[in-house]
Image (spheres, rainbow, N blue to C red):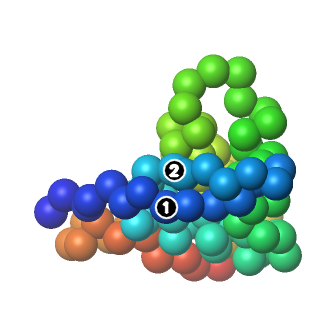
Amino acid sequence: MKSPVVKRSIVIAGHKTSVSLEDQFWDALKEIAANRRSTLSEIVASIDSGRNQGNLSSAIRLYVLAHYRSPAPGREAVEHSERNGSLRSTVA
């Protein structure tokens, strides 16, 4: 089943912008922010300031992918459920 891309508004560095992300990436980004005791705006601002090219939505997807591909000890990892395509967190 294909996950729809949803346009979401967020304020970063004092200005409102929008990103188009699938629910799974948005949920994973919220989970990363919560685990780091940070806000979505802070995480997205950090991603935005660190990107060299490409759009912000793609940069966020790559950030989430990199985060879960190289889990540090004690950090939560994500399991992909083949049944419904959703992400589920587990303690590594």
The residue wearing badge 1 is 8
Identify which residue, 53 or 88, lies in the foreground: 53
Which residue does the image show at 54% across and 52% down from the upper left?
18
Residue in the picture at 74% in, 51% down: 15
Name the amino acid type tagged 1.
Answer: Arg
The mark tally for this picture is 2
Q: Quadrant of the C terminus?
A: bottom right
Q: Are marks 1 and 2 in contact (CB under 8 Å)?
A: yes
Residue 50: quadrant of the picture: top right
Report the side of 64 relative to 52 (left or right).
Answer: left
Front one among 54 and 9: 9
Res. 78 in view: no
Where residue 19 is drawn, which disc sits there?
A: 2
Q: Quadrant of residue 48?
A: top right
Q: State the residue in front, 37 or 80.
A: 37
Pinpoint residue 2: horizontal percent, then vertical percent: 19, 58
Determine whether the residue tagged by mark 1 lies in a helix, strand or loop.
strand
Task: Residue 33: name its quadrant.
Answer: bottom right
Q: Earlier in the sequence, mark 1 or mark 2?
A: 1
Residue drawn at the location 61% of the way across and 50% of the way down: 17
With 1 as the anchor, is 33 left or right in this view? right
Mark 1 and mark 2: span between their CA atoms? 5 Å
Of all residues, the one furthest to the front in this rendering is 15
Q: Which mark is residue 16?
A: none
Residue 90 shown left or right of residue 20 in the figure: right
Q: Is residue 72 left or right of residue 90?
A: right
Assign the N terminus to one quadrant of the image.
bottom left
Residue 50 in sight here: yes
